[in-house]
Amino acid sequence: QVQLVESGGGLVQAGGSLRLACAASGSTFSSYAMGWFRQAPGKEREFVSGISGSGGSTYYANSVKGRFTVSRDNDKNIMSLQMNSLQPEDTAVYYCAADRRWNIHSGPGDPEVWGQGTLVTVSS
């Protein structure tokens, strides 16, 4: 089973950009579908974006479509989330997740592996 570590969170002004990274340990990274979730204070966890094991298929929530781009490098065991045009409502703890049997187009599922989260704060 892989282990996940997120990085790249921080404080940014509205309209700015951040790039999150999720580094995975283990040699079977490409067998995992991966995703990004976020949870803001007092709100439910939201499935933001997902990417298939090969990287050939992606999913975006309507709230981030056109602003966020997910990608992965299976040689480096890294998934990234490029976030542009950030808004205060994007403020949340962002988590990466992985599962070997996850169809990202069927919803958030129940991923078997989670990272510890990284905080993104967007000021107005």
Image (spheres, helix red, strand yellow):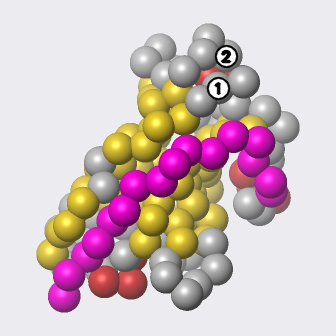
Which sits earlier in the primary sequence, circle 2 or circle 1? Answer: 1
Q: Is residue 52 above or below residue 84?
A: above
Q: Is residue 42 magenta?
A: no
Q: Is residue 66 visible?
A: no
Residue 60 quadrant: bottom right
Neighbour tally class for label 2: few under 14, some 14-19, many 20 plus, Cα within 10 Å: some
Residue 47, how many percent across, how many down? 63, 65
Residue 67, how many percent across, how many down? 36, 66
Q: Is residue 117 magenta?
A: yes
| Number of numbered discs on residues | 2
Asked whether, in this view, residue 93 is left or right of residue 2, the answer is: left
Asked whether, in this view, residue 86 is left or right of residue 49, the answer is: left
Q: Contact, CB < 8 Å: mark 2 with mark 1?
A: yes
Q: Name the mark on residue 28.
A: 2
Q: Residue at x 47, y 14 (%)?
A: 75
Q: Secondary structure at mark 1?
A: loop
Q: Name the mark on residue 2.
A: 1
> Which residues, given as a range, are shown in magenta?
109-124
Residue 62 quadrant: bottom right
